[in-house]
Amino acid sequence: MGRGRRVAIVGVGRTAHRSKRPDVNWAEMFWEAASEAVNDANLTFKDIDNVVSGNMELFEGLHRNDMWLSDYIGGYLTSGFRASSGGTTGATVGVTAMELVASGLSDICLGIAGEKQSEGDSRLGLTYYAGPMRAMNAAPGGAISMAARAAGAYMQRTGCREEHAAMVRLRADRNACQNPKAHLKLGLSSIDDVLASKYLVTPLRFLDMCPTSEGACALIVASEEKARKITNKPVWVVDWEVVHTQRFTFGFSGETHGLAAEAIFKKNGITNPRQELSVVEIYDPSTYMQLYLIESMHLCEEGEAWKLEEKGAWDRDSECPINPSGGVIATNAIGGTALARMCEVALELRGDCGGYQIAGKPHLGLSTGLGHVGWTVFCLMSNALD
Amino acid sequence: MTGKTPEKEAEELIRVDHPWYVEYRKTAGEYASVYLTHLREKGKRLAARCPNCQKLHSPPGCVCATCHTRIPPYPEGWIELSGKARLVYWDKQITPMMNIMGEETLSPNLLCTVVLDEGLAMLGMLDVLADSPEEAKVQNGLRLELALKPWSERIGSPVEDILYWKVLWDEPVVETKLDAVAEMSW
């Protein structure tokens, strides 16, 4: 990786996710995730020399969140940044922390992101974005209606049926049921359970969409020199790719995922990603979105993702497991969700996922982040340096 | 070129007003809930002492910012603040300004910085009106007592329940300085 010093993930922390956490305020919830990450790395808060935090400000009415948060995440008298980049906020937090360490500005950096969805109005925050002219064009139904139109377009383009989206949901639920930190653990028995759920905006059903969750996650990244002293299971950050553009409307196009995938695969000599990647955590706010993002990322040919779903090609015990954690469809504390994808890949590569650990010896993993207007952040990780 | 003044042209640019109404519902959390309930029911504020560095925090949080030690939940290490303080500094508002509730106000009372008997600094309002005959008697070191609304009117909010710092005119004045780095209470 030609980005400066080698960087490794040495600690991961996640809160349990629920619809509401009335037992903790926002900062206390973040403290839970930060504490878990610090304990996971066998460090103390005093070892952290930089903190990067993030949330979606309009959702909770909390901006400049670092002013409240710093006391709770080891930020007192420590350097820090705050990031807010829509749905990719969590990934931006993670990548910022990585860049700080890679550049030499930090040796051990905490990145933390999350959301308390019940405390504000996420729908309003999602509607008013990327300039007032775009906001005035936002359709009734907000993000869900845009995702629904993208789903319909995908079905029309490829022949995918509702049953295939239901298969994606069933797979996500089976994985989430094994993940103690996941939000929705529904125990679905078949795709009939999904197809029985009511429509939100056709063709999207209630169970085709992600929940609104409350939770936070954190990771600690360190320089190679520090990482080798901290842990015997470092997860090396191989590369990252950020595609932030205003041109695309959320959900309509996976083009930014395609651009990011092409760049990161080319730079790292990956020619057959489905074979070479041990695990992928995709930012999938809806079932159909996972399918067309799989195609956009060149994990299969266009129009093939739903056919491969029928064959179990994305299951936990397959060649290319997708979202063994349950993914965003099961858990979505929006500000932290993209960071959660990084955390889950890191845990899989460490072999620390317990009941939802993928089979074999995973060595190379990819996480993605997605936001409105198609913002995209990819992160490639490995448990080996070569 | 249009024959209009720049000001007139600027007025004619289209501007779309887009008012929002958003209801935010904040979770107090375990520590703040105890603090706010105690304020409402007992009319007293609480503070928690860090078991490691002994710093006092009011309102209490779950972790000490300075040494990152977990602060135990109520009642371990928690104290009830006396509500007594000394006046350090005061001033008066001349220009109306936005308050915390988003309203443009002009405080008729003098604004103050005080030091609690427990050592924490705090901002507030005196029960002395600006430009009143009493203003001339205000001096550093006055003895103060926190005044709250009566129990039946309290809702468990520092903003709503605390009225002002009442000056105890009959008590001796003791010169009081504030450390350059003082722990704040709010």
Image (tube, coloured by chain):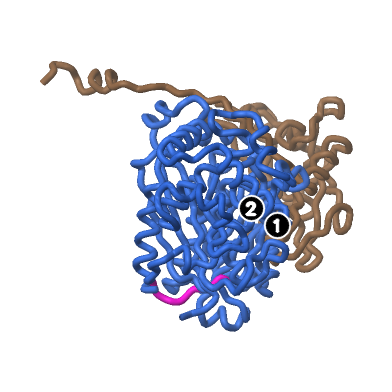
Chain colours: A blue, B brown
Q: In front: B173, or B58? A: B58
Instruction: Residue B136: name its quadrant.
Output: top right
Q: Which disc, if any, is residue A40? A: none
Q: Is residue A382 magenta?
A: no
Left or right of A41? Residue A9 is: left
Q: In front: B137, or A297? A: A297
Q: Is residue A6 magenta?
A: yes
* A247 relative to A341, above or below: above
Left or right of B156? Residue A338 is: left
Q: Secondary structure at mark 1?
A: loop
Q: Secondary structure at mark 2?
A: loop
Type of the residue with mark 2? Gly
Residue that badge 1 annotates: A179
Instruction: Residue A116: name its quadrant.
Output: top right
The span shown in magenta is A3-9
Q: Position of residue B55 (x, y in %)?
A: 75, 61
Chain containing mark 2: A
Type of the residue with mark 1? Asn
Q: Position of residue B46 (x, y in %)?
A: 82, 48
Q: Residue at 62% of width from left, 81% of height from top?
A: A232
Chain containing mark 1: A
Q: Position of residue B60 (x, y in %)?
A: 76, 51
Q: Are marks 1 and 2 in contact (CB under 8 Å)?
A: yes
Q: Residue at 76% of width from left, 45% of height from top?
A: B29
Q: Is residue B114 visible?
A: no
Residue that badge 2 annotates: A326
